[in-house]
Image (spheres, rainbow, N blue to C red):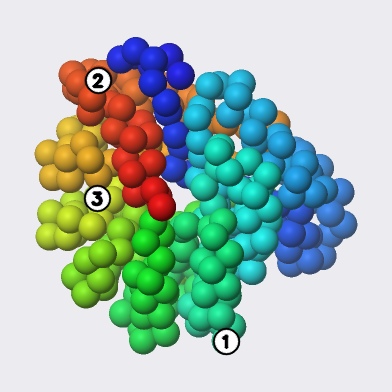
Amino acid sequence: MQTPWGEFPVSDAHVHFFSHAFFSSLAAQSGRPLEEVGGILGWCIRHSCEELAEAWKLELDRYGVAKAALIASIPGDEDSVATAVSLFPERFYGYFMVNPLAPDAGERVQKALAGGRLQGICLFPAMHRYAVGDSRVRPVFEAAAAHPGTVVFVHCGVLTVGVRQKLALPSPFDMRYSNPIDLHAAAQEFPEVNIVIPHFGAGYFRETLMLCDLCPNVYLDTSSSNSWLRYQPASLDLKGVFRQALGVAGPRRLLFGSDSSFFPRGWHAQIYEAQTEALRDLDVSADQARLILGGNLERLLQR
């Protein structure tokens, strides 16, 4: 991809894979037919994992993106992303969401990782209402430790799901479980497990930086519009966020992400442009930019 620093591979650490199963779940919760859900959202619903994988592959081709981490966005949807990875292993990494409180969570995690297609375990403590220190979460970190090249992705901070708001669905999330500091014990106990926190902590920026400073196995995913900045002092902008993150975590622990999700919008190029502009304004070197924009992700998920 042609970047402000020259041409080199760019990989996206955060792309949601909104499968047919994802939309079917929304339809069931809202009591609406699937077609009506698509109409309300104005989104294109692909009717197979293969079709959706092909669409994302073509979208990456369109923008020159080398690779993307695809996230299964509901628990139990591991097979959707695994199918996409099996079709285009040179273009996709596979992440899946798990609710550690579910009775079959441990079995699902083991099966997903054993399949060899999935490398990211996604935890949403506020969504599923549990503390990261709960004993039922421990098997997730144990499984990740047993499979080198696996990351544990933990959503912290403010959690809003726009699709649920558009469909007038409740979002009974609990922010008591959103603080990244809660990961400190697990990050120390499992130093071989790399932990990824998206959106710079989504409002818990200070706490996320503290955790990064204490735990070298914690990485920051830069994805989304970072609207959490409205909770910060007006003087802090995206450039300032990158400056502080680079000062604490360094260029080797930042992972570029777009938070792309649905069609017809496709890959969120505006997010990429805003982030590269901020990095360029900070006089980030070409070598550092290469790491942030894909090199770090490739290194983390190398098997």
- Which residue is tagged 3? 205
Q: Secondary structure at mark 1?
A: loop
Q: Position of residue 176 (x, y in %)?
A: 35, 72
Q: Residue at x 41, y 66 (%)?
A: 147
Placement of 75 over or under 294, stated as above or below: below
Amino acid type of the residue that numbered disc 3 sits on in the rendered structure: Phe
Q: Position of residue 303 (x, y in %)?
A: 41, 52
- Which residue is tagged 2? 286
Nearer to us: label 2 or label 1: 2
- Which residue is tagged 1? 103
Q: Position of residue 145 (x, y in %)?
A: 34, 70
| Distance from Cα at disc 2 to Cα at disc 1 | 47 Å
Amino acid type of the residue that numbered disc 1 sits on in the rendered structure: Pro
Q: Secondary structure at mark 2?
A: helix
Q: Secondary structure at mark 3?
A: helix
Q: 233 or 148: nearer the eye?
A: 148
| Distance from Cα at disc 3 to Cα at disc 2 | 26 Å
**Figure disc tally:** 3
Placement of 265 over or under 43, stated as above or below: above
Placement of 191 over or under 12, stated as above or below: below
Asked if residue 20 shows in the view, the reply is yes
Q: Residue at x 63, y 53 (%)?
A: 81
Which is more N-terminal, label 1 or label 2? Answer: 1
Amino acid type of the residue that numbered disc 2 sits on in the rendered structure: Ala
Q: Residue at x 87, y 57 (%)?
A: 33
Q: Position of residue 16 (x, y in %)?
A: 57, 47
Which is more N-terminal, label 2 or label 3? Answer: 3
